[in-house]
Amino acid sequence: MSAFDKVIGYESIKMELIRYADVLKNSEKYSRLGVVPMSGILLSGRPGLGKTLLAKCFIEEAGWKCFVLRKEKPNGSFVNEIRKTYEKAKEEAPSIIFLDDMDKFSNSDCEYKDTEEYVTIQSCIDEYKGLNIFTLATVNEIYRLPDSLRRVGRFDEIIEVIPPSGKNAEEIIEHYLKQKKAVGDIDVKELSLILDSRTCAELETIINKAGIYAGFANRDRICHQDVIDAFVRMLYESPECINPENERENMKIAIHEAGHAVVSEVLEPGSVTLVSVCRNSWSTQGVTNIHKPDDFNLSKELQEHEVIRTLGGRAATEILLGIADVGCSSDLEEAHSQVDEFVDNLGTLGLDTHTRRDSSAYICEKRDQLITSELERYYKIAKQIIVENRDFVEKMRDELLKQKTLTFRDIEKIRKELEEKRG
């Protein structure tokens, strides 16, 4: 039985860590092969993904004595603590030094990363190399570390821990649901699409909050809708209900979000996992949650779809209400940034508009004109989709005003009903 059996998902990462733990645990068989001991492993990723749990499992699996370092003292005292810990580890070798949240050891920034704490860690790793001392670290923001600390020979392996998706997300959601005493009919596959790329900590909190919703409603089971409500409330900070007195504003938001959703569904059927008119008091828009395929960043077509759906809310408001959507400035900024990336950084529309620091005014003006032209072209596509699928937009609008939040299954049902009606 492995210490990693307590970790749900992350199969490839677990296999990698089990292999490296075996190098420590059974060093003799590797030394016979001429294998040089590793200096360390760095686990990198967003907070809440389980990096510390994976590290603790690695320590347990390896079976070496462990010394844990966390930033709990002032800078000067902490630097001394780092040195003392490595000295203790040398005395009780073989041993592991676990640097938890190492990017918090120093107040470094992108301009000045070589702070005393990181220089001390570097020198200690080098000084105690070959003395059966292994350095294991976790970081949330790896860019805060100096390149010299991250290089091979200090951290021989950098493992990125990414948010769970697909089958991994399903397994983790099922794990947290099993910890609840009463769970009703819940579609785990749909939840995994909606909660795709959320951290383990977020998934656990959402499901726990779903139990609060069920209990407050005096129901004896947690249902699917409880999880959806908890997701919208926690991750989008939306209020419990929309203002029933502001019908015009509610209508406008419903049309805007229906526009985003319909454009996305026409371009990529099944891409919208959730759409809601619930919103923050400071926001003029609701929520449209999109599932992006793994190859999204490698496909210009998919990235163009992103621009068009970003403009879908404005297009729907203009066509159905006949007014400019003055509340969608963030959408316009996002779409402009996306097209700017095509025109300038990626050069997918020609290299003659790529700007540099010394670019002429003519090149910059040409670039801006091309961005504006492309935005107009994408906006026309979005409006055409809305016009050709007006019944879809209106049905989505009506259901959003009635239910507030629609999921993947609701949208699928609406689309099938319209297809049958159209014959």
Image: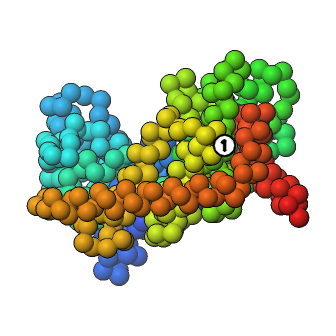
**Residue that extends furthest to the top in the rendered view of this protein:** 245
Residue 243 location (% of width, % of height): 67, 21
Q: Residue furthest bottom?
A: 33
Question: Is any part of residue 128 visible from this angle?
Answer: no
Query: What residue is shown at x 26% (from left), y 67% (from top)?
Result: 353
Instruction: Say which quadrant the N terminus sits in.
Output: bottom right
User: What is the basis of the colouring in this image?
Assistant: rainbow
- Judged from this view, the residue extending furthest toward the front is 322
> What number of labels is visible?
1
Q: Residue at x 25, y 62 (%)?
A: 366
Q: 46 left or right of 193?
A: left
**Is 343 situated left or right of 208 in this image?**
left
Residue drawn at 37 percent across, 64 percent down: 342
**Rendered location of residue 369, percent (x, y):** 31, 59
Q: Quadrant of residue 201?
A: top right
Measured from the top left, where is residue 356 in percent x and y? 17, 62
The correct choice, above or below, for 250 with respect to 34 in the image is above
Name which residue type carries label 1: Leu
Nearest the viewer among 172 and 130 is 172
Question: Which residue position holds label 1?
Answer: 320
